[in-house]
Image (tube, coloured by chain):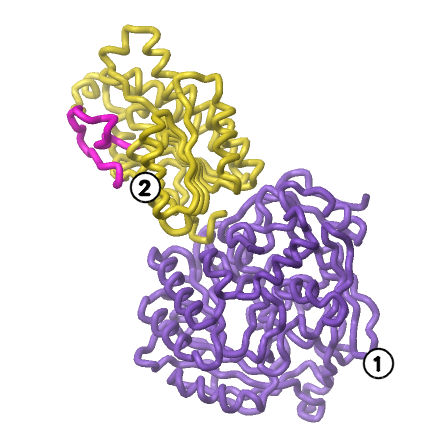
Chain colours: A yellow, B purple
Amino acid sequence: VNDAFGNAQSVVVFGGTSDISRELVALLTADRGRSVVLAGRDCVTLAKRAERLRRTVARVQTVTFDARTLDDVEETVMACFEAAAEPVDVVVVAVGELGSQTADEAVPDRVARMVTVNFSWPAAALSSVAARLRLQGHGRIIVLSSVAGYRVRRSNFVYGSAKAGLDGFAAGLSESLRGTGVSMHVVRPGFVHTKMTRGRPAAPFAVRPEKVASDIVRGLKRGHAVIWSPPALRLVFPVLRLAPAALWRRLPG
Amino acid sequence: VTVTTTSAPQLLSGWGRTAPTTTLLARPVDVSSVQDLLRVQPGGVIPRGLGRSYGDAAQCTGGLTVDTAGLGHVGALNEEAGTIEVGSGASLHELMRRLIPLGWFIPVTPGTRYVTVGGAIAADVHGKNHHRDSSFASHVLELSLVTPYGTLTASPHHEPDLFWATAGGMGLTGVIVSAVLRLIPVETSWMLVDRQRFSRLDTLMSTMESTDVRYRYSVAWLDCTQGRNGNHRSILTRGDHAPFDALPNRLRSRQRDVPGDPSLRVPRTGHGRILNRLSIRALNEAWFRISKESEGSLQSLAEFFHPLDGVGGWNLLYGPRGFVQYQFAVPPERGDVIQDAVRTVVASGLPSFLAVLKRFGPGTPGPLSFAQEGWTLALDFPLGPPSLPALLDRLDDAVAAAAGRVYLAKDSRLRPELVPIMYPRMNDMFRVCRRMDPDGMLASDLSRRLGIPQ
């Protein structure tokens, strides 16, 4: 159960192998964490992450799932909550795949897969998570969206449009949770130096995963429904969203 | 069944307004409806009185919270024995209003009248007279408790393990439905009060050590917003019930005035924080200036015991983020922990609105009962400063190392691993809970957070 300062005791992470979630879980559990469930696809990386976390957290468990198929979303969420075996204070949904715009955009199967991984699976999981937290009486959900979904652009519209869908879904779900003791926090990072973006040219305002994690924790303490990282993007993107298409097209990154 | 369960789950928090969670709320009106509620509760169940615990002791996330307001009957006074039988939902406010005109008073009253008898037992509350009269449960002759195992009566002589596990047990042994209390006779509702000011913490503490025995009630207020090298100013207030002869003529007609309801109420704005670093400093300054030294001055009961009750909903002054209370006790020879704590808090610059120091007499056999012989210091802090959580964690370590403990009725952030160190008789609690509640149905956010009973 959360303490007065919002420190969580029990955390469940979907997308437990991502660099951002690694940093985020370390921060979330630093003070009072005692149970973490890491769910992801790559069981080898999951096992490594779990091993490292066990130095600071008493109980760490892993669950494997594949976000490319939608058959077992409910089973996966249920498995994670059962593994936690106590009220889950924070759920992190950091499932996603950047893909390759040029390779994906003209191949229907690939587009469908990108939408599944970045939108359908996380949205389906969110609906199940939200229902469970409501029953449980409290909890905070952190969803990794992206500035790419804030205004979708030519250079990554497959990924961006799926994130836009997720961002909208999360915003609506967030409203539906008002007054229930459950809160939703949508994270919109800019370019983050992670293994997902390795080899790509960094955009302006690029940050490291540690910075995203600390921005998220700060936003969480302040109860922000939308968390930008770096926080300066909160001022930049609403302006860019209004930029004329001719200008928008020419922007770097 | 005469149970009213609210249809929609409610968001509940403690008096500090931190960490709210949703729960179903039931307000049973008799013992049999409490029994019905304790049959099957897969999400857990915990009783709640007036919600004055600062932290998360009286809420149960995803479960059921049993509001005892419907169990507030006040039975007949036994004038001969000086006892009264009351429902657990009766408030001390209500009891005082009934008893004072009859010449009786409650033997132990905490800093607020707005607590229930059930809550006072479950937190085993203490008052300014602990050094002489022990804690609330020491004046409970018998209590009636609904547990998942059944409905039982317990007293220090009959089912003593259950009685003492319930005293200070934070509701984890069952729902108290009624109790028989021992009362004290009083001639008037006025207090004869001596007030001294100190500019050094060590002289305050030695004065309390040497002369507290002369007074029934004693408490010191510290200004934790300034001072260094032990130069922290304080006001020691001590007194006893005034006999009728001590009243001047103008007060004789008001011999048995009863405390009223708050004349001021903080509006629920949802925003804004009135108590911040600056205002806390200013209020401490003002409080010190208006509190002149005096001897044998008369104060009303409410002024003496419950100054904060004059402002309804004063917890709202801390704004929507709320505040934490931190109270700990250390053995008599460990006054150094108190001095270190005050020094640490003053040096940190973190504002504490109310810092209260008091000496405790011997504790009770209750495994989770807070008061133990020695010193106790209570502090409160508005939420927000990033250095606050770590500061309190450091204080915890010092308290645990000194064989002291933190008050669970005020806790909202203790580290679970320190609980069995601070409360070494936790096993007694565990044994009783296993017998009364084999399925572990009784649970609060506090018990889950701290892993009680372990």
Up the image or down, A139 lies above or below B99; here it is: above
- The spot of residue A35 in percent (x, y) is 44, 43
Of residues B335 and A141, the one drawn nearer to the viewer in this rendering: B335
Give me the residue at 17% from left, 28% from top: A202
- For label 2, count other residues whose C-alpha is less than 10 Å away and answer few (under 14), some (14-19) or many (20+): few
- Could you tell me which chain the residue with mark 2 belongs to? A
Farthest-out residue, bottom: B245
In which quarter of the view is residue A137 placed? Answer: top right
User: Residue type at mark 2?
Assistant: Arg
Q: Which residue is mark 1?
A: B80
Q: Which residues are magenta?
A: A189-211
Asked whether A191 falls inside the magenta stretch, the response is yes
User: Residue type at mark 1?
Assistant: Glu
- The spot of residue A6 in percent (x, y) is 43, 49
Up the image or down, B167 lies above or below B373; here it is: above
- The spot of residue B41 in percent (x, y) is 68, 43
- For label 1, count other residues whose C-alpha is less than 10 Å away and answer few (under 14), some (14-19) or many (20+): few
Q: Are marks 2 and 1 on the same chain?
A: no
Asked whether A197 falls inside the magenta stretch, the response is yes
- The spot of residue B93 in percent (x, y) is 68, 68
What label does residue A52 carry, if any? 2
Up the image or down, A245 lies above or below B378; here it is: above
Give me the residue at 19% from left, 26% from top: A198
